[in-house]
Amino acid sequence: MRKFTLNNGLELPVMGFGTYKAESSKIILDAFKAGYTYFDTAEFYGTEKFIGQALTEGNISRDKIFIASKVWKTSMGYDETLAAFNRTLENLQTNYLDVYMIHWPRPDLESQDWANLDLQTWRAMEDLYNQGKIKALGFSNFLPLHAENIINNCRIRPSIAQLEFHPGHTQAFALNYYREKNILVQAWSPTGRGRVLKDELIISLANKYHVSTVQICLSFNLAENVMSIPKSSSLERMRENLDSQNIILDNDDILQLENMPPLGWGGEHPDRVRIML
């Protein structure tokens, strides 16, 4: 079975399950039943407790799954991050995380000291990593500008960068930057929250391969060596999403998807006012 190997040697599945807006532990249990072993959460999502409940209710051995969480904007800083991490462990009913990330590089757009705040947050994560409480470190919504600050000043290198990534919004410069740094890119919005699914190219390729439009997006992301984090509340859709890793797109079709006009961006940028779309 294909896996992604991080720059510190940790092996991850090629697709994870997103828990943003998950409403119960049943959804987590269904995802595990469907075959997911990597679960993405965050203190901000309010879903950590559902993963913890699912581990108990499903009698799931902790070493059978990967759990990733994130420190929120209001919990950045050395001491604040340590406290946030402990809350996360309590919510998850576990004593370690597989992946821990900084959720956003800036606490707010007015912050003038964001670079130092990121480094203090990273220092706390590095200490937790060295204590064996985290297996890999990363960040979410960091563009190369923000990543350089960490990379040039870190003791433990980032292993994962989570971005909005999907056909029509591939963030090519950031993607290539992270490829060069041997940092795995994860797509937190692998279908543009559904905004790209009515595009005529996506529909035509779905018809060509006899699959769903969602599966075209997910198989494209994998072709770009990007780990997708789709979410769903339907067991059937969960399985369908996982099956997309078996779809092999023709090179010409990949090129078409890479060169789509801009489409489906969610309107969130770490250095700009959020644009509501």
Image: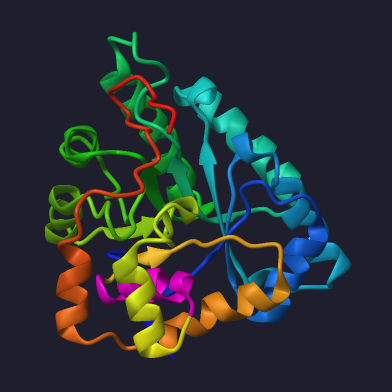
Q: Is residue 83 left or right of residue 122?
A: right
Above or below residue 178? Residue 2 is below
Magenta stretch secondary structure, dominant? helix
Q: Specify whether residue 219 is painted magenta.
A: yes
Residue 147: x, y in percent? 23, 39
In the rendered image, which quarter is residue 5 located in?
bottom left
The spot of residue 243 in percent (x, y) is 51, 84
Residue drawn at x 44%, y 44% as measured from the top left: 101
Classify 161 as above or below 110. below
Is residue 128 positioned above or below 165 on the image?
A: above
Give whichever of 6, 257 is nearer the camera: 257
| Residue 264, horizontal then vertical, whole percent | 36, 48
User: Residue 215 at what x, y percent from top left?
Assistant: 45, 75
Residue 193 appears in the rendering: yes
Q: Is residue 254 left or right of residue 131?
A: left
In the picture, which quadrant includes the N terminus? Answer: bottom left
Q: Quadrant of residue 106?
A: top left
Residue 275 belongs to the span the image colors magenta: no
Is the C terminus in the top left, top right, bottom left or bottom right quadrant? top left
